[in-house]
Image (cartoon, grey):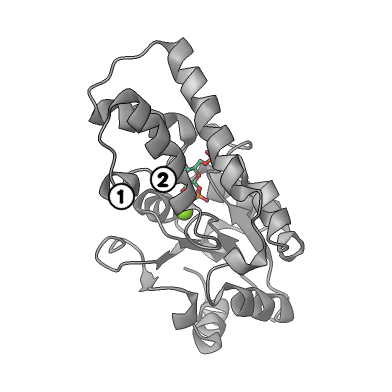
């Protein structure tokens, strides 16, 4: 049977944690008197925690010492984690479970490729850890998306070449990372924003098993 490596981003693909990241960053921005909106939050998707803070400080033309930055990074993460306390499988985005189950049925290898350092607790709380044959997250990489490092390590852990790998991503930086890696990029979200992806679906409810079969059997990307 043909096999491909299926690599899933986490935030915005499997769970909608962008809303919690937003609330936690908003609290820091408010304290600093920086105007931070939902539109600004789009700039932070797929971007590391450290880089996210720099983007917010740039928005407010705010100069800060490394000591202050470190303090805010800790505060932001504590606030973010407080939103995850009650997280359970109801937070898995629509259509994700059926696709994960179908891939397992077809014995396709599955990996996580996320920028988040909180990926493991999220997979545990939502009860989907066992679907993943490999997990690569923000703790395992030194280069943030659009650098392809996270996806290249994920493919390697599954024992597949980039050309045999398929990435589901909701962020522009993540789609670019998949493309740079020469993997098949599938955008989840708005097709204008994610126009660089090979395919774009609004969400997983729009992806059917026929499409999955087609990409499994495609010779290489
Ligand atoms: P953390 P993904 C990314 O996860 C988020 O999209 C991004 O907004 C966040 O800043 C980043 O993780 C780091 O998250 O603060 O939990 O380490 O989309 O790559 O799964
Ligand atoms: Mg994401």
Q: Nearer the viewer, residue 136 or 24?
A: 24
Residue at the disc numbered 2: 22
Q: Are marks 1 and 2 in contact (CB under 8 Å)?
A: yes
**Mark linked to residue 104:** none
Q: Is residue 190 left or right of residue 126?
A: left
Q: Residue at x 57, y 73 (%)?
A: 96
Element marked by disc 2: helix
Q: Residue at x 42, y 59 (%)?
A: 170
Q: CA distance from mark 1 to mark 2?
A: 7 Å
Residue 145 at least partly seen:
no
Question: Percent position (x, y) of residue 204?
Answer: 49, 75
Query: Extreme right residue here?
Result: 130
Question: Percent position (x, y) of residue 180?
Answer: 40, 50
Q: Nearer the viewer, residue 49 or 137?
A: 49
Nearer-N-terminus badge (1/2): 2
Question: Percent position (x, y) of residue 7?
Answer: 58, 60
Q: Residue at x 28, y 26 (%)?
A: 33
Q: Is residue 101 left or right of residue 49?
A: right
Q: Is mark 2 within 8 Å of ligand 1?
A: no
Q: Residue at x 22, y 22 (%)?
A: 61
Q: Is residue 68 left or right of residue 130?
A: left
Residue 217 at least partly seen:
yes
In which quadrant is the N terminus drawn?
bottom right
> Eyeballing the image, is 38 above or below 96?
above
Residue at the disc numbered 1: 38
């Amino acid at each position: 049977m043909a096999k491909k490596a299926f690599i899933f981003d986490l935030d915005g693909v499997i769970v909608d944690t962008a809303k919690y990241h937003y609330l936690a960053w908003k609290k820091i921005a408010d304290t600093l008197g920086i105007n931070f909106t939902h539109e600004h939050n789009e700039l932070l998707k797929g971007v590391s925690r450290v880089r996210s803070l720099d983007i917010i400080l740039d928005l407010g033309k705010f100069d800060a010492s490394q000591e202050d930055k470190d303090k805010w990074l800790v505060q932001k993460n504590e606030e973010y984690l407080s939103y995850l306390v009650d997280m359970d499988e109801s937070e898995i985005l629509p259509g994700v479970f059926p696709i994960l189950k179908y891939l397992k049925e077809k014995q396709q290898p599955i990996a996580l490729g996320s920028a988040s350092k909180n990926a493991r607790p999220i997979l545990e709380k939502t009860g989907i850890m066992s679907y993943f044959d490999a997990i690569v997250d923000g703790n395992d990489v030194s280069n943030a998306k659009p650098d392809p490092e996270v996806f290249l390590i994920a493919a390697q852990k599954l024992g597949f070449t980039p050309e045999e790998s398929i990435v589901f991503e909701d962020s522009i930086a993540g789609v670019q990372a998949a493309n740079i890696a020469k993997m098949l990029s599938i955008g989840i979200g708005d097709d204008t924003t994610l126009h660089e992806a090979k395919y774009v679906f609004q969400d997983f409810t729009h992806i059917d098993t026929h499409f999955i079969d087609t990409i499994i059997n495609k010779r290489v990307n």
